[in-house]
Amino acid sequence: MTDRTDLESTSLTDRLVLLGLTELRQRGETPAQTHDLREICRKQLPDESEAVVGSVAEPDVMRSLYTLESAGLVEETEPESTSPVGKGRPAYALAVDPDAVVDAVADSPLEPALEE
């Protein structure tokens, strides 16, 4: 398990991705692939935060997931299915308590996303 300091040292984009995974976990939709996570991140990003974080593209989500995986905050799972060319897209799930994510993000500029 990670401590709160690990979560608080993440970038705003990383926090947005963690919030997205938290919401998807609460819905029972994890592990999630990057394209699904990108869509939930875009919906969660308050309009005024876009000036700080910018728009969220799939490469941004992928970079964030790699960083978060290295920090032990998310985990990659094997793809459930493969594409027609035999490759699967990795899926990701939280490796930390969702409440810890919400607590760590509560004081950041993304706080309005938590109120929905």
Image (cartoon, rainbow, N blue to C red):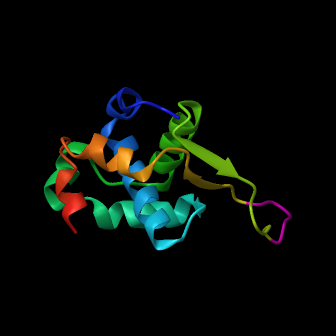
The image shows residue 94, relative to residue 73, as above or below, that is below
Q: Residue 92, how many percent across, how many down? A: 60, 54
Q: In the rendered image, which quarter is residue 34 located in?
A: bottom right
Q: In the rendered image, which quarter is residue 93 located in?
A: bottom right
**Relative to 38, 62 lies left or right:** right
Q: Residue 116, how many percent across, how many down? A: 22, 69
Q: Specify the segment rendered in magenta.
A: 84-88
Q: Residue furthest right?
A: 86
Instruction: Residue at 48%, 41% (x, y): give it.
Output: 64
The one of 5 and 15 positioned closer to us in this rendering:
5
**Relative to 50, 30 lies left or right:** right
**Count of numbered circles in the view:** 0
**Chief secondary structure of the magenta span?**
loop
Q: Residue furthest left?
A: 48
The one of 42 and 21 positioned closer to us in this rendering:
21
Instruction: Residue at 49%, 63% (x, y): give it.
Output: 25
* Residue 38 located within the stretch drawn in magenta: no
The image shows residue 105, relative to residue 27, as above or below, that is above
The one of 60 and 37 positioned closer to us in this rendering:
37
**Relative to 28, 13 lies left or right:** left
Instruction: Residue at 18%, 45% (x, y): give it.
Output: 109
Instruction: Residue at 74%, 61% (x, y): give it.
Output: 79
